[in-house]
Amino acid sequence: MRLAPVTRDRVLMQAVIILGVVLLLYPTAADWFSSRQHNSETSGYVQAVEKVAPEVRRDLLDIANDYNSRMPQGPLRDPYAGEISAEEEGAAYAAYERMLEASANGVIGSLVYEGVGVDLPIYHGTGEDVLAKGVGHLYGSSLPVGGPGTHSVLTSHSGLVHATLFSNMPKKTALGDVFSVDVLGEPHYYRVDQILTVLPNQTESLKIVANEDYITLITCTPIGINTHRLLVRGTRIPPPLVETEPGFWVPGDGVVAGFPWWAVGLGAGVFFSFAVFATRSTPRRLLDAPTGN
């Protein structure tokens, strides 16, 4: 007697189930790895800043404040326009990229916005390579070091499959929310006082206002369509009296990615596919071998 051969259909079905599980879990897994990368970048920045002497940090901040005071106040371009301005190809932009330089990984600070689950590194510029991995500072706006008569613009993507970034902002941002920016070990806190949805070329609200200290967060909206820009402006407020004060999330050294539950789901899916078809591996019929008389 001999067993019937294993059919290719069973192997194909196993492959289909495993592929389906992989596709289903990919966004979660990719975001987990992205969060780990963000945490690594922010932690590296914090450690680098801790190694910088206090007087050097003070000098870097003084230089940034001086840069802000001398910065020409012209119209800002849409950070998602794609084109590179003439200014960004010259010596002025090269000098800008050296501002607040304290680590080798290019990070100049971190943004924490608990209400939308954001704890991300901040980089110079708004190139695609920056916006895909964290928060970009819009060249031409004030450096994010605070102070009267400053208005810094920070931006990141929404709706990416591999990373959350600013994806929660369109639905979860609310007036009164508090976010913070930490640069060279100095945290500054901002309360959301204005939320606007505008066309890409409507940048009037990004102008500097005398004696005001603003930061505006920008992302594309609606997600996947990206015809407009969501502008979330925060105005400077005093730091919390205690770290546990409601509504505040004190900057740390990055968000922990958490347990990779997606890996459990993947393992369960693979186990299920083999377990189900293993029960079918028992021969459904036996073929009688020829017998002699």
Image (spheres, grey):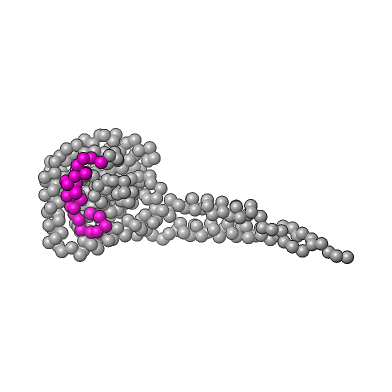
Percent x, y of residue 84: 25, 41
Q: Is residue 23 magenta?
A: no
- On screen, residue 215 versus residue 62, left or right, reads right
Q: Residue at x 32, y 58 (%)?
A: 39
Q: Residue at x 20, y 65 (%)?
A: 51
Quadrant in the picture for the N terminus: bottom right
Q: Which residue is drawn at 39% across and 40% down?
A: 224
- On screen, residue 287 versus residue 6, left or right, reads right
Quadrant in the picture for the C terminus: bottom right
Q: What stretch is highlighted in magenta?
A: 84-110
Percent x, y of residue 267: 51, 60
Percent x, y of residue 146: 17, 49
Percent x, y of residue 119: 30, 54
Q: Looking at the image, can residue 141 be seen?
A: no
Vertical order, 149 against 241 (above or below): above
- On screen, residue 131 versus residue 54, left or right, reads right
Q: Residue at x 31, y 46 (%)?
A: 128
Give the quadrant of residue 32: bottom left
Q: Is residue 109 magenta?
A: yes
* Residue at the outermost right position: 293
Name the residue nearer the viewer: 37 or 147: 37
> How many discs appear?
0
Give the quadrant of residue 45: bottom left
Name the residue nearer the viewer: 273 or 128: 128
Vertical order, 9 against 51 (above or below): above
Q: Looking at the image, can residue 84 be seen?
A: yes
